[in-house]
Image (cartoon, rainbow, N blue to C red):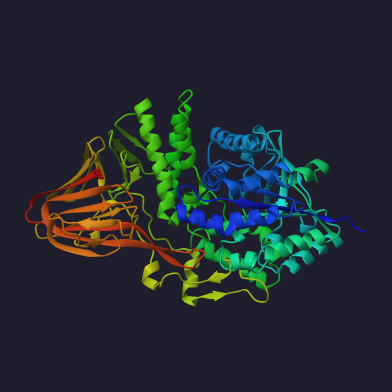
Amino acid sequence: MNSPVILLLGVHAHQPVGNFPEVIEDAHLRCYKPFLETLYAYPDFRFAAHFSGWLLDWLRERYPADMDLLAQMVKRGQVELFSSGDTEPVLAAIPHRDRLGQLRTLNQKLQQWTGVQPSGAWLTERVWESAVVPALAETGIKYVTVDDYHFFCTGKSSDELDGYFSTEEDSTRLDLFPISEALRYRLPFSPAHEVIGYLENLADRGQAAAIYFDDIEKFGIWPETYDWVYNRGWLKALIEGVLASPKIRTGTYADFHAQNATRGIVYLPTTSYSEMNEWTLPMPAAGIYSSLLASEKAAGRGDLHRPFVRGGIWRNFLTRYPEANWMHKRMQSLSARLAEIPNPPQELTDDLYRAQANDAYWHGLFGGLYLPHLRRAVWNNIIALEGKLDALTPRPAFITVDLDFDGKNELIAHNAALQLVIRDDGLAAAHELSSYALNHNFGDTLRRYHEHYHDKIAGGASSEHHGEGIASAHDVVGFKHPVTAEDIIPDSLPRALCQDELDEQNLTDYQLADAETLSFARDGITKIYAISASTVTVCWQLTGLTGHRFATTLHLAMPSCDGFLGRYVLADGSIPGGFGQSIQLADASALTLEDGVLGGSIRLQSSIPGEISGRPQQTVSQSEAGFEKIMQSTQIRLSWVIPNDACTLKIDLNIEPQKP
């Protein structure tokens, strides 16, 4: 008779830095709490868990009794806690020095809390690059989990993947456990008895281990899962069925690692889970890739050929989305500045690590980069850190650099209150306007992109699931908001501040005239930026354009978005509407945008009265609840008929914190 198969079950819990407190509370009440309470009642069911350090701190502060259950399970040997980067960065996307710091931070938290030093680590989004091996090993990590797909790409078969393998980088060893995709798609969506039958079949085939490590949020937060997992008893049925089966034993990764030898050496390609490899591709490449996989699956060759049709890698998100790339390169530059300071204050390191949280840098099945509050959390920490670094080690008031490696220089001007970044790309527009008093980047918006999943919209709501169990969020197409074809037309230009038009034609041919004076020119127009205290001034000198209509558009990231705390205020104090509404003003020269979430305002003042309009700019993306429209910025358009052949037009943008 074959030995029982050892179920190595691990769950990963994470909430993005900057997520809404009510969202985290809901996740705890519908998932983390009932999951821990259920497992606590079955001390013989052993498993692994990873809570990102940022989330662990949040939960321990607000729900100490619930989290004490987890600590007790660790101390009685039921649970093995995995480490990772403290704020859940993609380790491959941050400098080596920060990998070490992030890992050590969470290692120390876990050791001080439970008395147990972690041996395993969760890799954020299972992004594998061999460059991360030295940092993991140097911080005491002996093994990590990655997808079985990573191994399939090396030619391994599923039957071989019932243990761990070893790899090395520059002679430094790290062991690798392959997570079973078959189990990932069964738990918790298939009925418990079917999962148990699948595990028992593995035992009958002589498999040593069944390896699972995936998001705990699937056990209560994903659609239908709370009722299915807890009210209808799926989790209890699974636990009791596993414990009752003579063919299944539960275990920890630590014990399995100590009691079993490696299956041998392996070198994995740079990759993530297979869905990520599609998400990271732009259109039309993502569509071609998806169609190829679908045709191979229809021909019965899907599983056979999929490992050799790999798509993109995680870092491609930084090439797909310039907004993510700019955040990333700003974060990297600040990391380098911080590294030059001996024994910096801990709060600076905390700012940096929070700015490295992965969630706002990419976009897949759910919001990520598309969610303004997640990007805002990254920017809050970038700007806070930069202000503190400037106080310790002042930098030049003006520099020219291609920080994001796009072949276009950025002109970066700053004072104690503001930073203005203008890209020399022909638009003469600002794509960052940061306030140090508010820790906010008013240029933090997102253009509309053609996403592969937009092609599903025409088909309407559907679900591909059949039979018992419930559907995975991967398979459901639904709509949180009505979406039309016009809502998903991609932008031809980025969304920036002071993008100019002449007679309703975009001006894209500005040339840099003088970098130090932030001066740009084209036929008939000279455009000059200046910053003084908390005010940005933009001046246009218009020559020979009498009677033509000139306009400039500002895409302003306002934290209230279409919520009730954001509003327009006119010069007479009246309120024409909120940021989620459209406004149209004739012969106006001033408009103030007040934002209660921001705790401040931005006031626009024009030297010549003209037309001012405002409307919300939205994107369409996926969420667990279906397709949704998300407000990215407030689009303010100022328009004038040029009165004479030698016209000087000026606008001031004054940024002020809210008065007490």
Q: Determine whether 158 is above or below 51 in the image.
A: below
Please state the horizontal and vertical placement of residue 329, each as a whole percent of the image. Answer: 44, 41
Considering every residue shown, the one lying at the far right of the view is: 1
Considering every residue shown, the one lying at the far top of the view is: 342
Please state the horizontal and vertical placement of residue 123, each as a whole percent of the image. Answer: 62, 46
Nearer-the-camera pick, 245 or 459: 245
Nearer-the-camera pick, 69 or 489: 69
* Quadrant of res 273: bottom right
Please indicate, yes or no, whether residue 456 appears anywhere in the rendered image: yes
Please state the horizontal and vertical placement of residue 141, each as a whole percent of the image. Answer: 68, 37
Q: How many marks?
A: 0
The residue at 60%/34% (across/down) is 104
Please indicate, yes or no, whether residue 311 appears anywhere in the rendered image: no
Nearer-the-camera pick, 643 or 497: 497
Q: Determine whether 480 is above or below 612 in the image.
A: below
Please state the horizontal and vertical placement of residue 106, each as a whole percent of the image. Answer: 59, 38
- Position of the N terminus, as image quadrant, is bottom right
- Position of the C terminus, as image quadrant, is top left
The residue at 27%/34% (across/down) is 415
Left or right side of 43 for 286: left
Considering every residue shown, the one lying at the far left of the view is: 644
Left or right side of 165 for 278: left
Q: Determine whether 587 is above or below 82 in the image.
A: below
Nearer-the-camera pick, 553 or 225: 225
